[in-house]
Amino acid sequence: MRLDSPQINIMTRACMKASRSLIRDFGELENLQVSTKGPGDFVTSADKRTEKILIEELQKAHPDYGIITEESGQINKTNVKNRWIIDPIDGTMNFLNGIPQFAISIGYEEDNEIKCGVIFNPIMNEMFIAEKGNGAYLNNSRIRVSNKKKIDDAIIVTGGPKKASKIKDKIFSEYIDVSKHVSNVRKFGSAALDMAYVACGRFDGYWQRELNYWDIAAGIIILKEAGGFVDFFEMSNDVPLKRNVLASNSNIHNELSKLIVKKNIE
Ligand code: 2AM
Ligand code: CA
């Protein structure tokens, strides 16, 4: 069985439509790498183009829903009951450098809880979808988190610090600590895909600080429905859209959490 509720259909249709222009733009980048202006401005407009298509498609179905997006901020702010959370290109730096590890991410939130999510890597043609209570899928197959039991054997993915981060040293020291206790740590550059990869067992766990809600909204439900655990640690109530995320299979969650959270409480 694959998910086919109205909400999921709206989200996947929007994703497919937006991905056509995104794939074209990704192809164009090859020519721009050699131009003097460089690809920076082009990527910004690819981001905006993709977001515009997503918003148009989602609004066609539900003009009244709230929308939180990376590029345009908030739309229909007063509707906080039903909201789409959109990241048009998650993994922008990969996209910019011609690395096919990026995705469109859309979460659907109802009464402050994420109910459905879609993460689509258009280059690999991999679509991760989930709906509360109905499981998580990669294309047509049900997915589950890995069954790895020992943290020493785990492959963990992470991201950051971003350039402007004020806690770079803390993040690097965390990276060293985790590296010492696990089989390997990787950095792939797309928070949405990192979470999706934990959901389908390619990685055993993931953590990252200083993310925005749109980076992870869809990933939250995909991970949960795949049997994973998701924590937001050391969150500040002043900045509700900012998140520190820790996600993994249930076997290693406690140990991974001890490595990261305990020693960083300020
Ligand atoms: P983005 O590609 O949409 O910017 C990379 O480690 C991951 O962190 C990506 O998912 C990236 O999303 C996200 N991220 C969020 N804020 C960032 C920032 N200021 N700089 C770099 N990556 C950021
Ligand atoms: Ca992002």
Image (cartoon, rainbow, N blue to C red):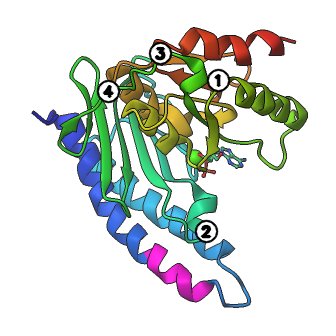
252 and 31: which one is in front?
252
How far apart are the two marked residues, 3 and 1, measured between alpha carbons? Answer: 33 Å
- Kindly indicate whether the residue at mark 1 contacts the one at mark 2 (C-beta within 8 angstroms): no
Q: Kindly report which numbered mark, 4 or 1, lies closer to the viewer in this rendering.
A: 4
How far apart are the two marked residues, 4 and 1, measured between alpha carbons? Answer: 29 Å
Q: Kindly report which numbered mark, 4 or 2, lies closer to the viewer in this rendering.
A: 4
> Quick one: quadrant of the N terminus?
top left
- Kindly indicate whether the residue at mark 3 contacts the one at mark 2 (C-beta within 8 angstroms): no
Question: Could you tell me residue 168's position as x and y percent?
Answer: 86, 37
* Label drawn at residue 149: 3
Q: Kindly report which numbered mark, 2 or 3, lies closer to the viewer in this rendering.
A: 3
Q: Is residue 200 magenta?
A: no
How far apart are the two marked residues, 2 and 3, measured between alpha carbons? Answer: 37 Å
How far apart are the two marked residues, 4 and 2, measured between alpha carbons? Answer: 31 Å
Q: Which residues are magenta?
A: 25-32
Residue type indicated by callout 4: Arg
The local secondary structure at tag 4 comes to loop
Sequence-wise first label, 4 or 1: 4
- Kindly indicate whether the residue at mark 1 contacts the one at mark 3 (C-beta within 8 angstroms): no
Residue type indicated by callout 2: Leu
Sequence-wise first label, 2 or 3: 2
Mark 2, residue position: 96
How far apart are the two marked residues, 3 and 4, measured between alpha carbons? Answer: 14 Å
* Label drawn at residue 144: 4
Q: Is residue 26 magenta?
A: yes
Residue type indicated by callout 3: Lys
Tag 4: Cα neighbours inside 10 Å, few (<14), some, or many (≥20)? many
Mark 1, residue position: 240
